[in-house]
Image (cartoon, rainbow, N blue to C red):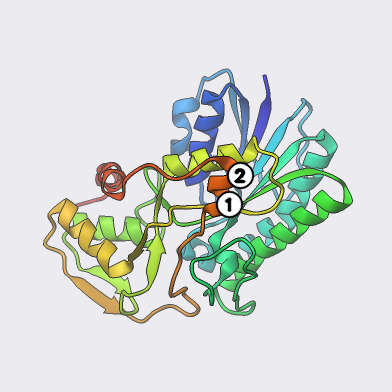
Amino acid sequence: MKTAVVTGGAGFLGSHLCDKLISEGFKVICVDNLITGNTDNISHLAGNENFSFIKHDITNYIFLPDRVDYILHFASPASPIDYLQLPIQTLKVGSLGTHKVLGLTKEKEATFLLASTSEVYGDPDVHPQKEDYWGNVNPIGPRGVYDEAKRFAEALTMAYHRYHSMDTRIARIFNTYGPRMRPDDGRALPTFISQALRAEDITVFGDGTQTRSFCYVSDQIEGIYKLLISNETEPVNIGNPDEISVNQMAREVISLIKSKSKIIYKDLPVNDPKVRQPDIDKARRVLGWEPKVKRSDGLKITIDYLKNLTII
C-alpha cells in the first residue's frame, strides 16, 4: 500500500484529495495546522485505518518515521479574505513551508505535487492563460502575498527537480467550487449563494463584467490525481474553460435559489484579475483529462451543502 502525505488536508481541496487517495487504495497522512482548515472536513475519516491526522504547522520541521511515497503540498490560505488577513502566514507557508516539505520529500525519495494556482498569472495580458505565459503580477500589491508565495513555490519546486533530480508535479489550480467551502471564505460563489439564501443583496465588485471559470471539485480532484500519477514535471492548468462573467454567475445563483436578492456593486479590489480562463489543451493531451460536471449540476449540490451552514 502506497502512503501519501497531504499538507493542508483539512481544507476544502485537501480534504477531498484525502478522500480520493483513500478510494484509490492509498494510506493517507493528513497534516494541517487548522488556521483555515477544519476537522469537520475530515471527521468522516475518523477511525479509518488508512487515515491519520497530525496537527502541525508545516513551516516547522516535521518528522515522519515511516515510508512515504507521495507528498501533496496543499497547505496555504487560499481565499482572498484569508490571505489578506494572514499575509505573513501565507508568505511563510509558500516559502518556508514549501522548503520544509520539499526537504521531507527528498529525504523520503518520494514524489512531490505542489498545489499552485491560476493566480501566478496575475491580471493576465494573455487570454486564455496557457502554461507558457509568465504572468502579470504586482509583487507589492495586497494580493502579492499569495501570488508571489505560489510563484516562489513553483520556482523552488523546479530547483529541487533540476538540482536534486526529484520527481515533482505542479498543478495550477483555477477557481474551484463544491461542498466543504466555507460560506464566509470571501470567494465569489459561496458568498453569492449565502447572500441569496438569506435574500440579501448580492455584492459584486467592479461592474461584474470580469470573468471567472468555475470547476466543480470532483473534476478538479480527478485532474490533480491524474497529474500525480503521470510523468509530467512542468506546470499543468487544472480548471474548467467554461468562462462566465461574475454578473452572469450572480444571476444563475439567484435563479437556482429562487431568491429575491438584488445585485449591488462595490469598488473592484486592487489588482483583481479582469479575466480568468484556463487553456487546458495540455491537460487534455498529457493527462487525458477534462471537466465533466455541468455548472448547473455542481451549483445545485453546492447550494444544498451551503444551505445547511447558512443562518437564514
**Visible residue check, residue 10:** no
Three-letter amino acid code at disc 1?
Answer: Lys
**Visible residue check, residue 12:** yes
In-image side of 35 versus 57 (left or right)? left
On the image, the x and y values in percent for residue 294 come to 31, 46
**Residue 260's quadrant in the figure?**
bottom left
Is 90 rendered above or below residue 204?
above
Q: Residue at x 64, y 39 (%)?
A: 228
In-image side of 87 versus 271 (left or right)? right
The tag on residue 306 is none
Please give the residue where the numbered disc 1 appears in the rendered image. 282
Q: Secondary structure at mark 2?
A: helix
On the image, the x and y values in percent for residue 34 come to 55, 46
In-image side of 308 versus 126 (left or right)? left
Q: Secondary structure at mark 1?
A: helix
On the image, the x and y values in percent for residue 162 come to 84, 52
Q: Residue at x 61, y 24 (%)?
A: 26
* The one of 265 and 198 positioned closer to us in this rendering: 265
Please report contact status of discs 2 and 1: CB closer than 8 Å, yes or no. yes
* The one of 35 and 269 positioned closer to us in this rendering: 269
Decide: few, some or many residues near mark 1? Use Cα within 10 Å; few <14, some 14-19, many ≥20.
Answer: some
Is 85 rendered above or below residue 11?
below
* The one of 217 and 7 positioned closer to us in this rendering: 217
Q: Residue at x 38, y 68 (%)?
A: 211
Please give the residue where the numbered disc 2 appears in the rendered image. 286
Quadrant the N terminus occupies: top right
In-image side of 155 versus 115 (left or right)? right
